Structures are given as structure tokens and as C-alpha cells.
């Protein structure tokens, strides 16, 4: 979601200023982001807070709440907000276990809630899950940021409550390693752009 929603505009602005600089984007799962930073393949990574190790430093950027996305004809679309427990009686779409978001959904909710059962699982991208929800075959809990740029009026979102579950998007980098001047400038532009998503 970070690569899809924020990076294109930052890359456009950075490239206009530095047209000869090259940028490599590793759009991978949270654990792979951590490995790329630890191994020096990437100078910094954008990932979920929690995907870190002792040799990395983490700088939180912002909180991104989970919302319910569904077709506008779905019964839950008529609600102003939806409680997590209410999902138990509906067909739920989820992301695969390699996703850092899946860990938040599996372990971030209190134990007194019914275990979230899913009917459909997509492996990597919320966009596939949103397409299934748009087809009317289920509902999906997604970070609000995943809906950025979604223009189809048939897909609606509702706040998920009791509890309100959020994820923290953060920058990670290796401790004690100074970023290159190019990476420092790119990261500064990224943080400025992300100051108010």
C-alpha cells in the first residue's frame, strides 16, 4: 500500500530534481523488507512497525486504521460502523500469512472476540481482496490507506470498531549506518509528503 499510494508522487518529484539518479523499489512483504535493510540491499525500508530487529532503528510515520470494505449492496454497507464480532456471520476475505497485516488481524484483536474465520484468502495484495469484495462475494478488513485511489462507487468502507485496530507505518534502517546523501534527500521528501496522508 505504501508503494502504491505515496511513492509515485515522491519519485516523480525526486526524479524531476535528480533525473540521473536511479531508484530501486523492492515491493515485498514486511519480513523481506527487514531482510533487505539488514543485508544492505536497501538503505531504508517502509514497513509495519513491529517488523524490526535489534540492529535496526524504527521511525514511526503514521497510524493507519483498519476499515471494512464491501460492495454497496452488502448488508454491512448500510451501517455507519461495524463491530469486529459482526463479521463472524459473513464471508470474509483475508490476506495470506506472509503479510504483516495478517499478523495484526490474527493477533491484534482481543481474545474475547470470536476467532476471525475467513472464506477467501489472497496471498499478497489487498487489491485482489478488494476486487473480490467489489464482486460482492465477501467483505475484507483493510487498512484505510489501501483504499486510496479507489474510485468505484460500488465499493464502500465502514469504520471497524470494538476495538479500533490500527497499524503503524514506519521507516526502518540499520543502526549506526549513515544514509547516502541521495537516500537522505529522498527520505526527507517522503516524510514531508507523508506528513498528512
Image (cartoon, rainbow, N blue to C red):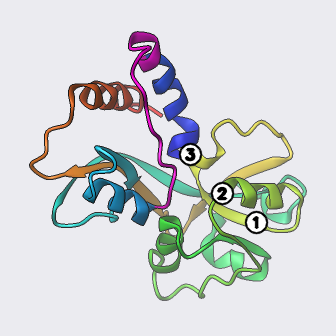
Give SS at disc 1: strand
Compared to residue 86, the image places residue 172 above or below, namely above
Disc tally is: 3
What residue sits right under mark 3 in the picture?
A: 145
Q: Is residue 118 magenta?
A: no
How dense is the environment of label 3, judged by Cα within 10 Å: few (below 14), some, or many (20 and up)? some
Q: Which mark is residue 126?
A: 2
Give SS at disc 2: helix
Q: Which mark is residue 21?
A: none
In front: label 1 or label 2:
2
Residue 164 position within the rendered picture, expressed as x and y whole percent measured from the top left: 49, 63
Viewer-proximal residue, 154 or 3?
A: 3
Give SS at disc 3: helix
Q: Which label's residue is closer to the chain start, 1 or 2?
A: 2
Viewer-proximal residue, 128 or 136?
A: 128
Compared to residue 143, the image places residue 145 above or below, namely above
Q: Quadrant of residue 193?
A: top left
Residue 130 position within the rendered picture, expressed as x and y whole percent measured from the top left: 75, 56
In the displayed structure, does residue 98 sit left or right of residue 130? left
Tell me if I can see residue 78 in this picture.
Answer: no
Residue 81 position within the rendered picture, expressed as x and y whole percent measured from the top left: 66, 58
Tell me how far mark 3 sits from mark 1, CA to CA.
17 Å
Q: Residue at x 76, y 49 (%)?
A: 156
Compared to residue 179, the image places residue 88 above or below, namely below
Tags 2 and 3 touching, CB below 8 Å? no
Q: Which mark is residue 139?
A: 1
Q: Which label's residue is closer to the chain start, 3 or 1?
A: 1
Q: Residue furthest left?
A: 176
Q: Which residues are magenta?
A: 14-29
Tell me how far mark 2 sits from mark 3, CA to CA.
10 Å
Q: Main secondary structure of the magenta part?
A: loop
Amino acid at each position: 500500500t505504501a508503494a502504491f499510494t505515496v511513492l509515485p508522487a515522491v519519485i516523480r518529484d525526486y526524479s524531476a530534481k535528480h533525473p540521473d539518479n536511479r531508484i530501486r523499489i523492492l515491493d515485498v512483504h514486511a519480513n523481506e523488507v527487514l531482510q533487505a535493510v539488514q543485508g544492505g540491499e536497501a538503505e531504508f525500508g517502509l514497513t509495519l512497525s513491529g517488523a524490526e530487529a535489534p540492529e535496526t532503528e524504527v521511525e514511526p510515520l503514521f497510524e493507519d486504521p483498519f476499515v471494512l470494505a464491501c460492495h454497496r449492496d452488502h448488508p454491512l454497507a448500510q451501517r455507519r460502523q461495524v463491530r469486529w464480532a459482526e463479521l463472524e456471520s459473513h464471508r470474509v476475505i483475508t490476506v495470506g500469512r506472509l503479510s504483516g497485516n495478517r499478523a495484526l488481524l490474527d493477533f491484534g484483536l482481543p481474545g474475547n472476540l470470536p476467532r476471525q474465520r475467513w472464506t477467501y484468502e489472497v496471498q499478497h495484495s489487498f487489491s485482489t481482496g478488494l476486487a473480490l469484495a467489489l464482486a460482492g462475494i465477501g467483505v475484507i478488513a483493510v487498512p484505510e490507506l489501501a483504499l486510496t485511489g479507489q474510485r468505484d462507487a460500488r465499493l464502500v468502507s465502514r469504520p471497524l470498531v470494538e476495538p479500533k485496530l490500527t497499524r503503524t507505518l514506519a521507516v526502518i534502517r540499520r543502526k549506526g549506518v549513515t544514509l547516502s546523501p541521495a537516500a537522505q534527500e529522498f527520505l526527507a521528501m517522503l516524510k514531508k509528503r507523508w506528513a498528512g496522508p
